[in-house]
Image: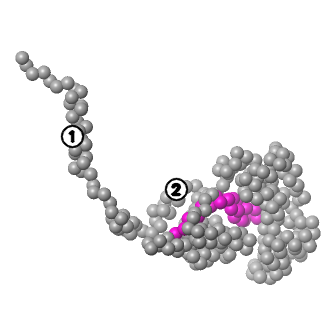
């Protein structure tokens, strides 16, 4: 009797066993810690990381040493600081680029990360814009350690928030409120008016604005007004009474009290210390 061919099922059953043996013979040996370090040492510092971050829209990175000096950043972060070249940023600190109240907050967060070794995630921080308002950024900070495990600084990623990325179901309404404040901060704007324009109750506006931006609508309005005052003090020769009126304050004394509390010095002293040569 002629020999029958083996059923396909038998042939199929043997193939995986043979493939597994072949894969086992070809499998590379496990990587050691030194192998990984040797590989990483061959990579140009920061190059791969910068390329990856560059693929993300409105996302920048930076690194600081323990003294708070910027030691690494991408071009987007440089532009966010109002500079054109990295050399303008290297070695400088937050106090060289931001109002003192914001710089103190950023530095406080940095110190918390470096002292505790625990990352800070999804902080919502304002960054002044050229139009005297603020952009809002989600910031993540992690400690940087050397090979001995000692913390030598920190690294951070900033992602610009938009209507679609705001951490709130009311993101679109909240950004409408930001826009309204930016357009009308010179006027007597009430929270009730802001809530009505956004189609929300006052309570809902205050609750969701705080949840989204970690501040209240009135505090943000005051911050925008003070940013406008700061700009006028540096770049114009206008009288303080006129600046107060143009920036939405009741009078000069009201503006002076708010400004001094916020920036730690009076408007006159601030103008003297920060006067633009062109003004």
Q: Element at badge 2?
A: loop
Q: Is residue 209 left or right of residue 80?
A: right
Q: Residue at x 73, y 46 (%)?
A: 170
Q: Is residue 15 left or right of residue 132?
A: left
Rounded to the nearest angstrom, the CA distance separating label 1 from label 2 is 43 Å
Q: Residue at x 59, y 72 (%)?
A: 115
Q: Vertically, is 102 above or below 53?
A: below
Report if residue 196 is visible in the image.
Answer: yes
Q: What quarter of the picture does the N terminus occupy?
A: top left
Residue 57: where, in percent of width, then height?
58, 55
Q: Element at badge 1?
A: helix
Residue 234: where, in percent of width, then height?
78, 76
Disc ID at residue 55: 2
Residue most toward the front? 116
Residue 249 or residue 147, whichever sits in front: 147
Q: Vertically, is 214 above or below 259?
A: above
Q: Residue at x 67, y 51 (%)?
A: 166
Report if residue 76 is visible in the image.
Answer: no
Q: Is residue 97 left or right of residue 216?
A: left
Instruction: Specify the quadrant of the image occupied by residue 40.
Output: bottom left
Instruction: Specify the quadrant of the image occupied by residue 9.
Output: top left
Q: Vertically, is 159 above or below 196?
A: below
Residue 83 or residue 219, whichever sits in front: 219
Which scheme is used to colour this image of the protein? one colour
Q: Which residues are magenta?
A: 123-144
> Majority secondary structure of the magenta segment?
strand
Q: Which residue is mark 1?
A: 18
Q: Vertically, is 47 above or below 13?
A: below
Residue most toward the left? 1
Q: What quarter of the picture does the C terminus occupy?
A: bottom right
Residue 134 painted magenta: yes
Mark 1 is surrounded, within 10 Å at the Cα level, by few (under 14), some (14 to 19) or many (20 or more) other residues, namely few
């Amino acid at each position: 009797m002629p020999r029958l061919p083996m059923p396909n099922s038998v042939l199929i059953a043997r193939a995986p066993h043979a493939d597994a043996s072949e894969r086992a013979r070809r499998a590379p040996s496990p990587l050691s810690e030194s192998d990984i370090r040797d590989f990483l040492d061959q990579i140009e510092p920061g190059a791969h990381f910068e390329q990856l971050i560059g693929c993300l829209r409105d996302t920048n990175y930076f690194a600081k040493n323990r003294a708070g000096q910027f030691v690494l950043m991408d071009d987007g972060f440089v532009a966010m600081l109002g500079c054109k070249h990295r050399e303008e940023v290297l070695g400088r600190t937050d106090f060289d680029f931001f109002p003192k109240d914001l710089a103190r907050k950023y530095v406080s967060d940095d110190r918390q990360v470096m002292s505790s070794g625990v990352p800070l995630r999804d902080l919502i921080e304002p960054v002044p814009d050229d139009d005297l308002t603020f952009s809002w950024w989600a910031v993540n900070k992690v400690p940087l350690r050397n090979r001995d495990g000692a913390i030598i600084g920190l690294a951070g990623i900033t992602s610009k928030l938009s209507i679609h990325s705001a951490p709130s179901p009311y993101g679109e309404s909240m950004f409408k409120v930001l826009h309204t404040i930016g357009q009308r901060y010179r006027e007597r704007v009430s929270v009730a008016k802001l809530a009505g324009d956004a189609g929300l109750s006052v309570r809902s506006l205050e609750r969701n604005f705080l949840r989204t931006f970690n501040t209240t609508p009135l505090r943000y309005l005051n911050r925008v007004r003070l940013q406008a005052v700061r700009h006028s003090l540096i770049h114009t020769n206008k009288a303080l009474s006129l600046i107060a009126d143009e920036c939405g304050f009741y009078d000069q004394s009201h503006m002076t009290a708010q400004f001094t509390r916020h920036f730690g010095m009076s408007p006159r002293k601030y103008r003297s210390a920060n006067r633009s040569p062109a003004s």
